[in-house]
Image: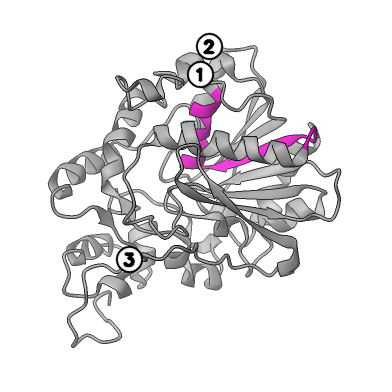
């Protein structure tokens, strides 16, 4: 029953947000002495989060990890399972984790200044790459990027803002975003109907309670759901109301399932116009067409794909319920339009979208493909 709350007789506040200055602490099982939290700002001054995990050697290649929108660096550090950082450390790499401005760890992720994905591609990712290079010298630098982190990285790459990477692993979506028809329609309708009523779609029903403006969204997400947890319903059964699915339920451990409201934050509705333009174009396109401050970004990243100067592995679960076969489409399009690029495609059977990193068996089923790609190019 999704309407059961801890204190159903008290009228809840509509939405509680954090307004402090500190980032929410990362949850991990690493020795704290190995985890370096770096005071870090984007190129336009926005505060971000950057974390380095000491691998115990100065000659290790570095790997920058980019999360998806509303997620955070926590998705790569799950203490309840063997996670990607564990695997990278054991295989001789130095992990770096960026919490870009769409991270749910940041104190302003719900209340801060609005932005588009242009800002992430222009200010967040290039600044992180530049800083890491200052620290690691001439060691190789790889990037492993998930979802919107990968999509915005593609815009940075085709703008020539992050040249000379040793290799890129893109999970879920890269240059050719493709959503299901019903997901695209719901995004459009929801954006128009709700834009003057709410600015975020929450995932934690405990914070908004029964008698709030969000109750109909949770009720809609619960239709046909097998899991009684409201957070799971709005993510697995509805993807913030879009009708898509973010993971295969059976691939998550109970501990990870219980942390979904911590691992993924509210989805901002004000980003939908840019996302909608991207989806309609079936390419990563710039939002700011007339603002000269963004002229470094190409109007259409796919048209500028020839500027990609690094090997790319396109990775996707066979059951990706959000971006469908976007990565397969990207591989086919690039093979036809830019055959000189070093781009490969790997599909993971019986995996969805988020579970490629959050899944309890991801270390066995997914991470080996990443390590093989990195190892061939280190």
Q: Which residue is mark 2?
A: 337
Pointers 2 and 1 in contact (C-beta within 8 Å): yes
Q: Is residue 325 visible?
A: no
Residue 41, percent from left and from top = 52, 46
Q: Earlier in the sequence, mark 2 or mark 3?
A: 3
Give how far apart the Cα atoms at labels 3 and 1 are. Answer: 42 Å
Left or right: where 253 falls relative to 239: right
- Residue sitting at 60 percent across and 28 percent down? 162
Left or right: where 152 falls relative to 130: left
In the rendered image, which quarter is residue 82 located in?
A: bottom right
In reply to whether residue 263 is colored magenta, the answer given is: no
Give how far apart the Cα atoms at labels 2 and 3 are. Answer: 46 Å
Display colour scheme: one colour
Q: Quadrant of the C terminus?
A: top right
Give how far apart the Cα atoms at labels 2 and 1 are. Answer: 6 Å
The label shown at residue 333 is 1
- Residue sitting at 48 percent across and 64 percent down? 22
The label shown at residue 17 is 3
Q: Is residue 182 above or below residue 40?
A: above
Crowding near pointer 3: few (<14 within 10 Å), some, many (20+)? few
Crowding near pointer 2: few (<14 within 10 Å), some, many (20+)? some
- Residue sitting at 55 percent across and 67 percent down? 25
């Amino acid at each position: 029953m999704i309407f059961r709350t801890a204190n159903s007789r008290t009228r809840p506040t509509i939405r509680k947000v954090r307004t402090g200055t500190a980032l929410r602490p990362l949850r991990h099982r690493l020795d704290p002495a190995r985890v370096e939290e770096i005071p870090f700002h984007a190129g336009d001054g926005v505060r971000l989060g950057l974390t380095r995990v000491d691998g115990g050697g100065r000659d290790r290649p570095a790997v920058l990890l980019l999360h998806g929108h509303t997620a955070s660096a926590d998705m790569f550090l799950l203490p309840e399972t063997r996670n990607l950082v564990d695997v990278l450390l054991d295989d001789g790499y130095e992990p770096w984790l960026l919490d870009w401005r769409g991270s749910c760890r940041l104190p302003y992720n719900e209340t801060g200044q609005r932005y588009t994905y242009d800002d992430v591609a222009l200010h967040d990712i290039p600044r992180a790459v530049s800083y890491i290079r200052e620290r690691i010298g001439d060691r190789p630098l790889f990037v492993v990027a998930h979802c919107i982190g990968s999509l915005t990285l593609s815009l940075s790459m085709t703008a020539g803002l992050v040249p000379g990477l040793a290799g890129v692993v893109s999970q879920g979506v890269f240059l050719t975003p493709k959503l299901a028809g019903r997901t695209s329609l719901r995004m459009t309708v929801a954006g128009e109907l709700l834009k003057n009523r709410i600015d975020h779609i929450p995932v934690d029903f405990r914070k908004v309670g029964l008698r709030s403006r969000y109750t109909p969204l949770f009720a809609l997400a619960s239709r046909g759901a097998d899991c009684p947890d409201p957070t799971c319903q709005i993510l697995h059964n509805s993807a913030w109301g879009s009708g898509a699915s973010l993971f295969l339920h059976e691939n998550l451990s109970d501990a990870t399932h219980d942390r979904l409201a911590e691992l993924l934050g509210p989805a901002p509705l004000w980003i939908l116009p840019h996302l909608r333009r991207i989806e309609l174009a079936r390419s990563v396109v710039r939002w700011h067409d007339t603002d000269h401050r963004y002229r470094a970004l190409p109007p259409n990243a796919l048209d500028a794909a020839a500027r990609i100067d690094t090997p790319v592995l396109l990775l996707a679960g066979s059951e990706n319920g959000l971006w469908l076969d976007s990565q397969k489409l990207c591989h086919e399009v690039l093979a036809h339009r830019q055959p000189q690029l070093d781009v490969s495609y790997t599909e993971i059977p019986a995996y969805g979208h988020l579970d490629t990193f959050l899944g309890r068996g991801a270390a066995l089923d997914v991470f080996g493909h990443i390590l093989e790609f990195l190892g061939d190019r280190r």
